[in-house]
Structure formats: C-alpha cells, structure tokens
Amino acid sequence: MKGIVFNLLEALVVREHGEDAWDELLDRAGVDGAYTTLGSYPDAELLGLVGAASELLGQPPADLVRWFGRESIPAFADSHASFFDAHDDTRSFLLTLTDMIHPEVRKLYPGADVPDFAYETGSADVLVMLYSSPRRLCALAEGLIEGAAAHFDEAVEIGHPRCMHRGDEHCRLEIALSAR
C-alpha cells in the first residue's frame, strides 16, 4: 500500500479525533507510523490500523474503511482537481477510473496497485461496477463512490449483491445516482 493512503488516513483521524487518537492507533496496531507519500508499506499495516480503530471505536472494520473512502474524496479533489473538473456527475467520473485515473495514479505513485473495475452501462438508472482486487477493499470502493456522489451533489444508493468476502469472484456494486 502506498504511503499516501496512510498519510491521508492520519490526516482524517487527526481531524476527527485528534493527535492522541492517531498515536493510540499506532500503538495498538504495533506500527511506527513513519509513512512517506511515495513509500510502499505492507497491507497488513493498514489492516492493523483498521482493526485497532474498530476495537477502539466499537465499529465494524468495513464501516471504518467506508468512512475513510468517503472522507478521502475532498482531499483527492483538492490535490487532483483535474480528475474531477472534467466531469459534471458521478457516473461519468466513475467510468474514467480504469482508463484515465488509474494510469495517472500509477504515474504519480510508481508501484501503486490499483483495483480492477469493469462496468455494465446498459441501464441509465443503475451503473454496475464489478470490483476485483486481492486486497478485497470493496468497502473502500463504496466509500469512495459515496464521497464522489457528495462531491457532485448527488444522492447515491449502492447495492452489493455479490462480494469477494462471501466467496464471489468479484464484487458487484449496483450504483443508483440521482440529483439532490
């Protein structure tokens, strides 16, 4: 996992809960917390931090990962405005992840391991996103979708009828968007 993810997590935890909370998470997870933006770190460190936060806050890990994704979007929109400015809505933004955004992410953060997405676009009402990743961070994908919808001032409902955590080959995210 790239250090930028850990840096963003730290900023969000400190913003919401303070410096002491971040230090407590580091201690509970048994990690030192010295993350550089371009550095690469074991996925287990992120999972350890999520586990520590789950224990500390009494919330399921998936809810915390979804929160992280949702709350990350404003920072991404600030630091990578060009990814967002070319779009008027969430659907068009999401459809650029594989062909436009992920290649740029790999340029900006060499060695970044991004998930695979495929889409079913036959319905104007529901965008189907097929998510696949060895990390199985589908909750993060859901949170990022929710954050993108908020960015574009849209309401979103996400169905998740198939999931890698339940033994499926990939996750099927059924995304219904509407104006607020």
Image: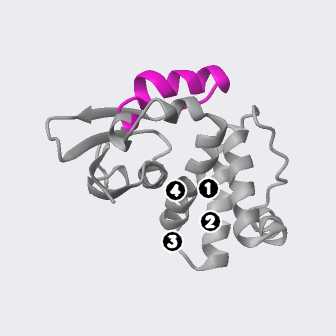
Q: Quadrant of residue 18?
A: bottom right
**Amino acid at circle 2:** Gly
**Above or below, comparing residue 111 to residue 63 in the picture:** above
Q: Is residue 24 left or right of residue 4?
A: right
- The residue at the far bottom in this view is 58
- 136 left or right of 180? right
Residue found 21% across the figure and 47% down from its top: 126
Please identify, in this view, whether the residue under mark 4 or under mark 2 is nearer the observer.
Answer: 4
Which three-letter amino acid code belongs to the residue tagged 3?
A: Pro
In x, y percent, where is residue 12? 69, 59
Which SS class for mark 1? Answer: helix
Q: Nearer the viewer, residue 104 or 43?
A: 104
N-terminal label among 4 and 2 = 2
User: Disc 3 vs disc 4: which is toward the camera?
Assistant: 4
* First in residue order: circle 3 vs circle 4: 3
Would you call the spot at circle 4 few (<14 residues within 10 Å), some (14-19), or many (20 or more)? many
Q: How far apart, in angstroms, are the residues tagged by discs 3 and 2?
A: 9 Å
Circle 3 is placed at which residue position?
60
Q: CA distance from mark 1 to mark 3?
A: 12 Å
Write down the region rendered in magenta. Answer: 93-113
Please tell me which residue lies in front, 51 or 14: 14
Identify the amino acid type marked 1.
Leu
Q: Can you identify the residue that label 2 sits on? A: 51
Q: What secondary structure is found at the residue carrying circle 2? A: helix
Q: Reply above or below: 29 against 83.
A: below
Tags 2 and 1 touching, CB below 8 Å: yes
Residue 147 colored in magenta in the image: no
Mark 3 or mark 2: name the one nearer the start of the chain: 2
CA gap, disc 3 and disc 4: 16 Å
Label of residue 70 in the image: 4
Q: Are marks 3 and 2 in contact (CB under 8 Å)?
A: no
The residue to which callout 1 is attached is 47
